[in-house]
Image (cartoon, helix red, strand yellow):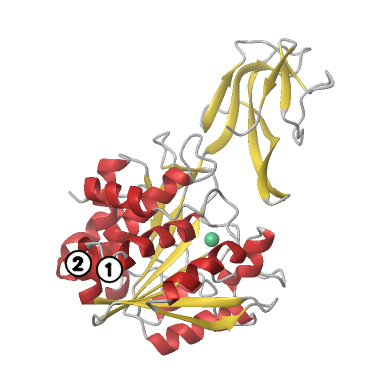
Amino acid sequence: MYSDLLTTLYQSHKESSLFGRYITPKMIAPLFESIGQEYDVSVIGYSVNQQPIHAIKLGTGEKRVLLWSQMHGNESTTTKALFDLLNAIISKEAVFEDILKACTLCIIPMLNPDGAALYTRLNANGVDLNRDAQDLSQPESAVLRQCFDKFLPDYCFNLHGQRTIYGVGNTGKSAILSFLSPAQDKQRLVTETRKIAMSIIAQINMQLQSDIPDSVGRYDDEFNINCVGDTFQSLGTPTVLYEAGHYKNDYNREITRFLVFKSLYYGLDAVVRDSDRNHHHRTYFNIPENQKNFYDIIVKNTIVDENSGKVEDVAIQYTEKLDDDSINFIPEVVAIGNLSEFYAHNYIDAKGKTIFAEDNTQMQIGYANVFVLINNEKITLKAP
Ligand SMILES: [Zn+2]
């Protein structure tokens, strides 16, 4: 029911200085400056390379919500959406009044600035911060934990991005957004804490179904105490994992950004109305689990081995590479065979013709080039 209003708000408040996948500390520094003129923006610590890590506090309510993004430096979609949301909030849009009255938000838009600058998942020491929740060996992990211990959140939103390989169960639909209420023990018990996070996710999902029917996935809940979400959940704070996923040709993740913007609102709105929680958590399990059954491109009905003449499929996956301040998507053949159980964001139908590498040799796994030859014609594999 909020969908149209949120669309209008997004269009008027989208942070226009942020676009695409490569979002760096330099790009967001001026945004902190302008937000800081009116709101509480502070440096809560420094990264390995001495980049400041900022937090923004908003709202006056009792429910304390801690949100952080870009713990993995190359997962920038949720960061863009956070600034869109912040723009709408600081413009005093009325729809946020209830949230700001009921909640105090602490927002860390970029926990891993070094990884963001390098466009890597890891921090500057090559550590995955989402496996460092117990050791706290890295300054960024310690910053988040100190913030958690000091702010004492009632809810956490742990914001990530996911690769293009995930489908919603076996429906053939891409997981445009995924969520998880992490386990807090090896038995994956459905504790009261988990139920609250599940209920929030179920309510977000219910709203999203009108925007993106059957395109929301649920992450598998294997327990790993070294993950931040599992740790915070085990400490009794309901923690919602958001994963910004992929839709068709949206390699810049701008469509997903808009859907994350909406989902952040839906999540906070669910926090405000948490009396619904016990009714909703059961439907969390109706969200299909993610499957790794998507490729970027599948070339269908092609002959790889001219001797056998067998009709097969060729799967191509992009590797993201930072080059001159932008992200290049390098296509690489990752599977050849009968791929009828898999789906792709884009298909090329070879109609039974032979596929060759660009130098006319037989197609092999590991072939990385922007073209293939099908029936002697150059077919581009470039990201749209
Ligand atoms: Zn991540």
Total labels drawn: 2
Task: Give the labeled residue for mark 1.
Answer: 195
Q: Which mark is residue 208?
A: none
Image x and y of residue 129, in percent: 59, 71
Q: Measured along the vertical axis of the image, is residue 20 above or below residue 340?
A: below
Classify residue 374 by image quadrant: top right
Residue type highlighted by circle 2: Arg
Q: Measured along the vertical axis of the image, is residue 220 above or below residue 131?
A: above
Classify residue 295 by image quadrant: top right
**Rendered residue at 66%/28% (across/down):** 381
Residue type highlighted by circle 1: Lys
> Does any atom of ligand 1 lie closer than 8 Å to the CB of label 1?
no
* SS category of the residue bearing label 2: helix
State which mark lies toward you, 1 or 2: 2
Q: Measured along the vertical axis of the image, is residue 296 above or below residue 314?
A: below
Image x and y of residue 192, in percent: 27, 74
Q: CA distance from mark 1 to mark 2?
A: 8 Å
Task: Give the labeled residue for mark 2.
Answer: 277
Image x and y of residue 63, in percent: 26, 79
Q: Tell me which image quadrant ligand 1 sits in.
A: bottom right
Image x and y of residue 382, in percent: 65, 31
Disc 1 and disc 2 in contact, CB within 8 angstroms: yes
> Does residue 242 appear left or right of residue 336 in this picture?
left
Classify residue 360 by image quadrant: top right
User: Between residues 33 and 209, which one lies in front from this camera angle?
Assistant: 33
**Rendered residue at 70%/76% (across/down):** 49
* SS category of the residue bearing label 1: helix
